[in-house]
Image: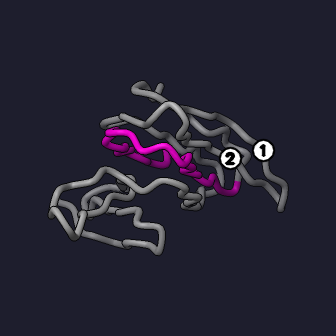
Amino acid sequence: LLETEVIDVCGYKVFKDINSDEFYIVSPDKMDKISLAYMPYDNNLKCRKTLPNRKGYMIHITSISMDVGPGDFITIKGSYAGFGKTLKKISGNEFPDYVAPVDFNSITIHFTTDDVYDRSSGFALRVSCK
């Protein structure tokens, strides 16, 4: 059973599984108001979503679906005591399962798109602390 937790300014949809510690992040999308056609996501986005980590736990990120244009990227950055480090940068159709090291206080998922329109459908990620 999922409940909508947040739809942030950039358009990320975040769903929390109320029966577990898992939640889901879905890429921004939009509806074209002229043709009423579904448009995957905007060009020139610079979105980020920070996920806190519980002390002693690792953050696990698993792809449910992944279709990101060639000039668009998901970047995962870790933060500890105010210092940040790029952990993973991904584009295309494959998102390998990822586990953030236990020593990070939080990770931030950055979604950056270029100015080229393509028909990519975006992404959906499952995130949990274990």
Quote the CA–CA distance across marks 2 and 1. Answer: 5 Å
Front residue (pair 103, 115):
115
Circles 2 and 1 in contact, beta carbons < 8 Å: yes
Which residue is rendered at x = 44% and y = 73% of the image?
Answer: 8
Q: Is residue 107 positioned above or below 32 on the image?
A: above
Residue numbers of the magenta segment:
105-130
Q: Magenta span has 125?
A: yes
Q: How many marks?
A: 2
- Horizontally, is 45 left or right of 25 in the view? right
Q: Is residue 51 visible?
A: no
Give the residue at mark 2.
77
x then y, percent, for residue 9? 47, 74
In the rendered image, which quarter contains the N terminus?
A: bottom left
Specify which label sits upstream in the sequence, 2 or 1. Answer: 2
The circle on residue 85 is: 1
Q: Dot 2 lies on which element?
A: strand
Q: Callout 1: few (<14), some (14-19), or many (20+) C-alpha neighbours within 10 Å?
A: few
Tell me the SS state at disc 1: strand
Residue 2, compared with residue 89, is above or below; it is below
Depth check: 80 or 125 in front?
125
Membership of 121 in magenta stretch: yes
Locate residue 5: give its quadrant.
Answer: bottom left
Q: Is residue 119 left or right of residue 130?
A: left
Kind of residue indicated by mark 2 = Lys
Q: Position of residue 117 (x, y in %)?
A: 42, 44
Which of the 4 image quadrants contains residue 118? top left
* Marker disc for residue 35: none
Residue 11 or residue 23, whichever sits in front: 11
The disc labelled 1 sits on which kind of residue?
Lys
